[in-house]
Amino acid sequence: MRGLKTCPILGLILALASLSLAAKLTQVTSGWDNPTKLSFYIYVPDKLASKPPVILVPHPCGGSAQDTFSRVATGLSAQADKLGFILIFPQTPNTCWDCSSTKSLKHNGGGDTQGMVNMVQYTLTKYSGDASRVFVTGSSSGGMATNTLIATYPDVFAAGASFSGAPAFACWNGAGLVSSANMDAGCQTNKKGTTAQQWGDLVRAASPGFNGTARPAMQIWHGTTDTVVAYGYLADQLAQWSNVLAMSFAKNVTGDPLSGYTKMVYGDGTRLVGYSAQGVGHIVPFREKEVLQFFGLL
């Protein structure tokens, strides 16, 4: 009888122990080079895959690592728990990511992009991660950072997914840090007339020493009624990456992944796709299923 009475207590103890061991977002404060004083948060699931993939998730303007983690926690981190990949949530002390200074627009230039890549390298080393399966996805300023990281570090990332972002080397090129004051629809007009070849040349110049056989794949999302980051940047990003990847437009697929969305497929759709979200403003809601499928993790 005594054993029967203590079973509920034992169950409670085991449940509490399980909660205490559950994965959570934690900060890394040392062990990596940090040229622009970024903050580094990481989510490591309790059960890691063998040679785990790594996904970097830069936040939007005015956001934080914690806010971004909460926004994707029910989807992306749940998949991390299931599939065993690691999530990195960087945080800038500024309002938005530096996607404009020469430091960030140059491979190993000492800007925000290098700081975030250093987080990736730390993670790969500490957790024996798979260097061939490193990805980046972000929204708004995080989407701009995604484009910039893919452009400047094609040797690090296998693919990226940009939500409501802008091309690498967009209108803030050389204008200093992006702020919410100049990140508006009018900004897109500064690059009107730029050809696909010119967009592509900017990317190739960002990492002139890259001699890899394949540049990172890109997935791009944008809402048609975005009044913060111009909808025209969707076409600019597709022009840029179709030129860089030497991919031709193949077809539109309406209603994919849901009503009001149009999927724009380049080639066979494994290297470059765009999504136009009819009536959606800033920011297009995150779609972890489509992102992870594009990354080859689902």
Image (cartoon, helix red, strand yellow):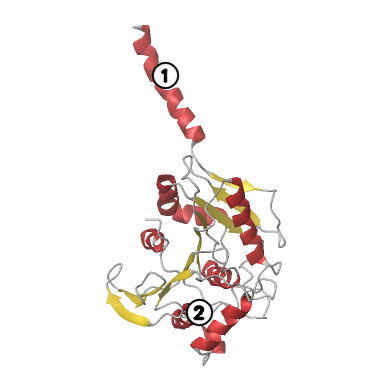
Q: Which mark is residue 71?
A: none
Helix, strand or loop for disc 2? helix
Q: Earlier in the sequence, mark 1 or mark 2?
A: 1
Image x and y of residue 192, in percent: 52, 90
Residue extending farthest to the top is 1
Residue drawn at point x = 51 percent, y = 69 percent:
143
- Please tell me whether residue 125 is drawn above or below residue 157 in the rendered image: above
Tag 1 residue: 9
Q: Which mark is residue 244?
A: 2
Of 251 and 204, nearer the camera is 204
- Please tell me whether residue 91 is drawn above or below residue 8 in the rendered image: below
Residue drawn at point x = 40 percent, y = 56 percent:
297
- Name which quarter of the figure residue 212 lies in: bottom right
Residue drawn at point x = 48 percent, y = 28 percent:
17
Q: CA distance from mark 1 to mark 2?
A: 61 Å
- Please tell me whether residue 2 is drawn above or below residue 232 in the rendered image: above
Helix, strand or loop for disc 1? helix
Label 1 Cα crowd, 10 Å radius (few <14 / some 14-19 / many 20+): few
Residue drawn at point x = 54 percent, y = 79 percent:
184
Residue 169 at least partly seen: no
Image x and y of residue 89, in percent: 56, 55
Image x and y of residue 33, in percent: 71, 56
Amino acid, disc 2: Val
Of 286 and 129, nearer the camera is 129
Amino acid, disc 1: Ile
Q: Is residue 106 left or right of residue 224?
A: right
Where, quadrant-wise, is the N terminus in this rendering?
top left
Marks 1 and 2: CB-CB under 8 Å? no
Q: Is residue 47 left or right of residue 122?
A: left
- Name which quarter of the figure residue 101 lies in: bottom right
